[in-house]
Image (cartoon, coloured by chain):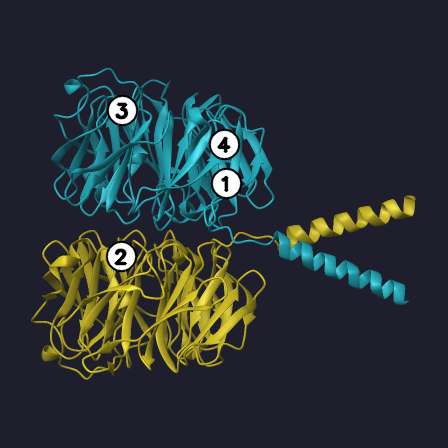
Chain colours: A cyan, B yellow
Amino acid sequence: MIKMFLRVSLFSLLVTLVQAEGLRGTGDMGIVIERATGSVLIIEHSSNTQLARVEGLGDLSHASAVFSRDARYAYIFGRDGGLTKIDLLTAKIVKRVMQSGNSIGGAISQDGQIVAVSNYKPGGVKLFAASDLAQLADIPATYEQNKQSKVIGLVDAPGQQFVFSLFDAGEIWLLDAKQSLSKPHIQKFSNIGKQPYDGLITPDGRYYLAGLFGEDGLALLDLWQAEKGAQHILPNYGKGQQKLPVYKMPHLEGWAEAGNYLFVPAVGQHAVLVIDKSNWQLVKTIPAHGQPIFVMSQPDQRRVWVNFALPNNDSLQIIDTFTLETLKTFKSGKGTLHMEFTPRGENVWVSVRDEDKLNIYDTATFELRASLPAHKPSGIFFTSRAHWTGL
Amino acid sequence: MIKMFLRVSLFSLLVTLVQAEGLRGTGDMGIVIERATGSVLIIEHSSNTQLARVEGLGDLSHASAVFSRDARYAYIFGRDGGLTKIDLLTAKIVKRVMQSGNSIGGAISQDGQIVAVSNYKPGGVKLFAASDLAQLADIPATYEQNKQSKVIGLVDAPGQQFVFSLFDAGEIWLLDAKQSLSKPHIQKFSNIGKQPYDGLITPDGRYYLAGLFGEDGLALLDLWQAEKGAQHILPNYGKGQQKLPVYKMPHLEGWAEAGNYLFVPAVGQHAVLVIDKSNWQLVKTIPAHGQPIFVMSQPDQRRVWVNFALPNNDSLQIIDTFTLETLKTFKSGKGTLHMEFTPRGENVWVSVRDEDKLNIYDTATFELRASLPAHKPSGIFFTSRAHWTGL
């Protein structure tokens, strides 16, 4: 009897220990894509440590991620069309589906219930249940006489919507995922410009912008006045002015907002463009250290950080958003591919692919706070993205 | 041997089950203050359920809360000067200190390491370690010949700073918590106006505004140009114009931002003021259903929701931020005290004190999605606040 009691007590004690051990908040967690090995590092940014590595995610050479609304699960979009749901707390793959042959990115709906993926091949958009990745809808990007378009620039928007662009069709589509998913309501905007190659939505979810590869300028859709259709802005900006070969296309999702200004990487030019959102005019062209890739603002919008294409992909440039002048340029290491700010901006994590490390800088002093090993790191994504629109 | 093996396996299985059971993401959690019973409800907003109740928090008649950066712990500031740290995952009080005789609110530093509390009696600000609530600093709000001032409007600001106002001194102080905490560096701004009664900081952490009780207008400090000192804005707005007795002071932390506009509750008037942030001029005075208390914008900034003082505290008014017109006014129930939007804005939680319930509305359709019981609920706080400045 006593033995039994002891055994039960011991068991309860162990269970309590295990429980306490396993528990942790998920608000300070994140993942780092290890592009060469198809693996993902799980990290936490309160004390800057690695927690675990998850392997078996296929081709992550151009991968991105979104998070569940409870900040526990990451959905990772692989280049090979793989969609993988991983559990940050157990460091395990929960589910993995091959949803197409070639994919470039995805988004999660406002309510966190639907994961959307945009595809190159065979084109179109697929919707999946965030819970078990069951397919909910397959939306072909059909235009003209049964032609299929590549889909790019897919983002979530307020009102349980998704917005995306059709590269081959020159269209922007607005999908309402609040209604029937078997026959989703789609509003189509045609003649938005030639070959939209990427898109972004402003943090408030109001403006959708698509970069154009086939002509100068950008396409702009004001979702608060969608009935007015897409506008063509910055008609004098683009490939027409291009003075250098484009080593790498900039990522539009890296555009930065500060007050009323947008900071935009100029394609192929050594420049960051500053656009006034109130009239969509160019305010200034800031000289850049190289061809900019990501142009990202600190959460406090006080400074914008820029990284570059080859041969300048070893540096970071920091721009003051008040004076619109460059504050500092420094060498962060070869293959500086991506940056992610801690949610309230005191630190920035930088992936340095060719040196197999992650550098963590103090955003106020630019001091290197820590450096962690990682296998060819590229994208860095923190769980705080779960709470933001369009990321 | 087989028995032993079975026992070990059974144990492992149970541990795994317990572990899996206890684990959950914390990104969709929150707390509700139950003001009459000194208790706090722990809730989650993915499927709109109550998870637990924590009791023993003292006088919560005017309470607020902030969250740890991992979104696991809440720090609750009670009216009686009690500061309580609770664990949302175990639903237990981790630590509770009585830090003063009378308190009104607090904030958490950018890096999540320091909790600051502003006090009425004896006045001043105290800093505590977020980990164990050990006191780090006691900063008296001394002015003139050793007079002590009440401190109000305490917020966190980028660069590991805190900003607060001295009611009796008519000053704004900017505290740098990055340096020594035993002798913290404080920048003081005098003659900012008579009797600042509450303050707020814009979401980017740039502008600090203090409402004035002793004169018309508001005090504005641009933290990007703090060397210019505080300005006096809206000189024709305030008590001087007041047509009605003030039943309840509006909460400045409830001010709303949408694009370049701020939406402000007019003290004592049936009006919401719209201010243009680019020149700090009044754009419009929107007629309100009563004396506004909280004026809060949806995360997408498309609409602003307003609740009211007695005798209109049974209603909500929704304003369209694009047309600046009222879209809808409806009865939400007696004692409608507070609102909290889900992080990406699809729902809003409303505390209805006199009916002992929480109403959850769809922000797109205004449909009542769920109603949960709660004891005299007041403030509602979701863990996503961990990632935002000034909340």
Q: Which residue is mark 1?
A: A74
- Depth check, mark 3 against mark 1: the one in front is 1
What residue is shown with label 3?
Answer: A170
Label 2: chain? B
Classify mark 3: helix, strand or loop: loop
Which badge, 3 or 1, is on the more N-terminal residue?
Answer: 1
Q: Chain ID for label 1?
A: A
User: Alpha-carbon distance for marks 2 and 1?
Assistant: 30 Å
Q: Secondary structure at mark 1?
A: strand
Image coords of residue A44 (percent x, y): 49, 45
- Residues A351 and A278: in front is A351
Say yes or no: labels 1 and 4 on the same chain: yes
Task: Tell me if B149 is positioned left or right of B57 in this view.
Answer: left
Q: Is residue B12 left or right of residue B255?
A: right
The residue pinned by badge 2 equals: B303
Label 3 marks which chain's residue?
A
Q: Is residue A86 left or right of residue B163?
A: right
Q: Secondary structure at mark 2?
A: strand
Question: Hey, which quadrant is residue A280 in on the image?
Answer: top left
